[in-house]
Image (cartoon, rainbow, N blue to C red):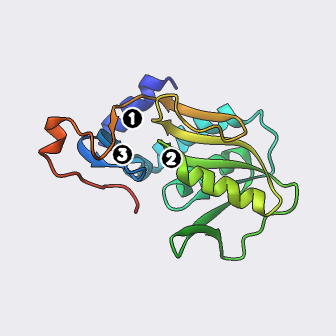
Amino acid sequence: MTQDEIIALFKQTHALLDGHFLLRSGLHSRQFFQCAILLQHTPIAARVCAELAEKLKGIETDSAISPALGGMIVGHEVARALGKRHIFAEKEEGKLVLRRGFTIAPGERFLVLEDVVTRGGRVQETIDIVRAHGGVVAAVGTLVDRSGGNAPDFGCPFISLVQLNPETFEPGNLPPDLAGTPAIKPGSK
C-alpha cells in the first residue's frame, strides 16, 4: 500500500479529522488522526498493520510492546502478523508501567509499536521500560509519523507507514482561526 492509499483509508473511515485539536503533546493542530476509528474496522486494521509488519520483518526481534491505549491494537496486530508475543504498558499514577504479570527477559529484543507519533513521549516511556527491565529495543514502528521529521532519536530505527507534517502550534502561538475556536481533545488522555 502506498502512503496515499493509507491516507485514503483514514479519510474513508472518517479517522482523519479536521478542526481545532489539542494533542497529547500539548500542541494544537488543525488535523487529528483518530486511529481507533480506523482500527475498529478489523479487516482494515489487519491490512494496515500487516503493511507495517512487512516493513519491520527484517528486524531481529523476539516480542512487541505498545503503550496503552492507542498502540495496543497496532502492537497486537503487528505482532500477530510477525508471529511474536505482544505485551503492553499502561498508566498507573500517571506513568506507564508493566502490569498484569508481563515480563521482559534480559536481552529480549522488542519492537515498540504505536499508532501515532508527534513528539514521541509515550514511545520514549515505553522504550525506557524495556531498557529498565534489561530488554533491547530493536525498532519503533508506527502507523502515522506526524512529527514532520522532528521525531526524537529513539536510538533505534523508526519506521512508519505514513509520514506527514501537519501544522502544529504551541498553545501561546495560535493562528487567529484556531484562537477563536475551542480545542477538542479527541485522543486518549
Marks 1 and 2 close (CB-CB < 8 Å): no
Disc 3 or 1, which lies upstream in sequence? 1
Q: Secondary structure at mark 1?
A: helix
> In the rendered image, is residue 77 in sight?
no
Q: Secondary structure at mark 3?
A: loop
The amino acid sitting under disc 1 is Leu
- Reading the image, the residue beneath label 2 is 115
Q: Is residue 107 above or below residue 78?
A: below
Q: Secondary structure at mark 2?
A: strand
Disc 1 or 2, which lies upstream in sequence? 1
In the rendering, at what x and y percent does residue 173 appear? 27, 39
Depth check, mark 2 against mark 3: the one in front is: 3
The disc placed on residue 27 is 3
The disc placed on residue 9 is 1
The amino acid sitting under disc 2 is Asp
Number of other residues with Cα within 10 Å of mark 2, as a class: few under 14, some 14 to 19, many 20 or more: many
In the rendering, at what x and y percent does residue 156 appear? 72, 38
Residue at the spot 54% in from the left edge and 32% down from the top edge: 161
Q: Nearer the viewer, residue 83 or 181?
A: 181
